Image (tube, rainbow, N blue to C red):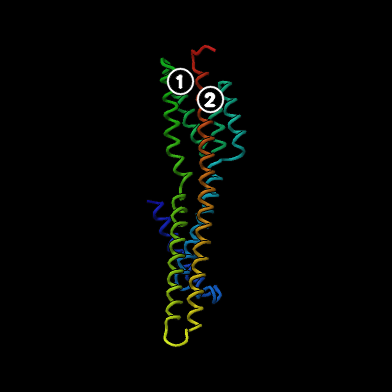
Amino acid sequence: MKQSVFITTLLIVAFVLSYVIYEYMLPQFVKDGGYLVIALITLTIMVCTFIVERVFSLRKAQGRGSLAVFLRTVTQEINKGHIDAAIGACDKQRGSCANILRTGLERYKMLVQEGDVKGQKEMMSEVQHAIEEAMMLEVPLLEKNLVALSTIASVSTMVGLLGTVLGMIRAFQAMNRAGAPDAAQLALGIAEALINTAGGLIAAIAGILAYNFFTTKVDNFTYMIDEASYSIVQSLAEKLPGRSK
């Protein structure tokens, strides 16, 4: 619900800002592209907004400080048997990876305190399940707005193509008039076609590049979380009460 409200609000604000830019800030040769230029500016503003939002969100998801140092610290504390210290490191680091690992550590601590160690495999299965549930909550936050970026890239291409077609129609109408072709209308039609083509390509290229960049970044981050979770679960298994070394 909040996501739909955010996108709707962004669309309205971007459209109003685009209209102001079109009316008062653009040179005349760009305005010759027609009112579809407003739509293309709106899409470009939305792409830029989503890019900025994703940059800050992914930076926040990484938490404070180096992830490699954080994971090394958590592993060392677990190997020492200091589960509370490992949880404290997660609280200090924050971010998606820290949230997921903290969920597993807290579940492990609770099971140990309850004395539920009759089945080591069952216990670690519960810890793994808690980690998987935490990942199901965190991963959608990492992938937020990526579909919107992909959609805008596709729509921008179509809007630009529509402007191209309309401009060419105007150009052919100028050529089809009786007598000498209207050179001014012919030039205006060609200009409209080319400007909309350029605008559509700019928004589409920005959207595609941003989508591929953030998708790769999220995939790498998710893979790192999977590896870290597996390593932590194995370290916890070694520290189960009653487990022989």
- Vertical relation: 44 (above or below) 127: below
Residue density around tag 1, few if under 14, some if 14–19, many if 20 or more, within 10 Å: some
The three-letter code of the residue at mark 2 reads Ile
Q: Secondary structure at mark 2?
A: helix
Q: Which residue is mark 2?
A: 83
Instruction: From the viewer's side, name the closer residue of 197 and 69.
Output: 197
Residue 97 in the image: state x and y as whole percent. 52, 36
Instruction: From the viewer's side, name the closer residue of 216 and 111.
Output: 216
- Vertical relation: 50 (above or below) 244: below
**Closer to the N terminus: mark 1 or mark 2?**
2
Residue 70 placement, left or right of 150: right
- Vertical relation: 30 (above or below) 200: below
Residue 178 in the image: state x and y as whole percent. 42, 86
Q: Secondary structure at mark 1?
A: helix
Residue visible at 50% across and 74% down?
Answer: 190
Marks 1 and 2 close (CB-CB < 8 Å): yes
Residue 200 in the image: state x and y as whole percent. 49, 63
Name the quadrant containing residue 169: bottom left
Per the rendering, the mark at residue 112 is 1
- Vertical relation: 42 (above or below) 147: below
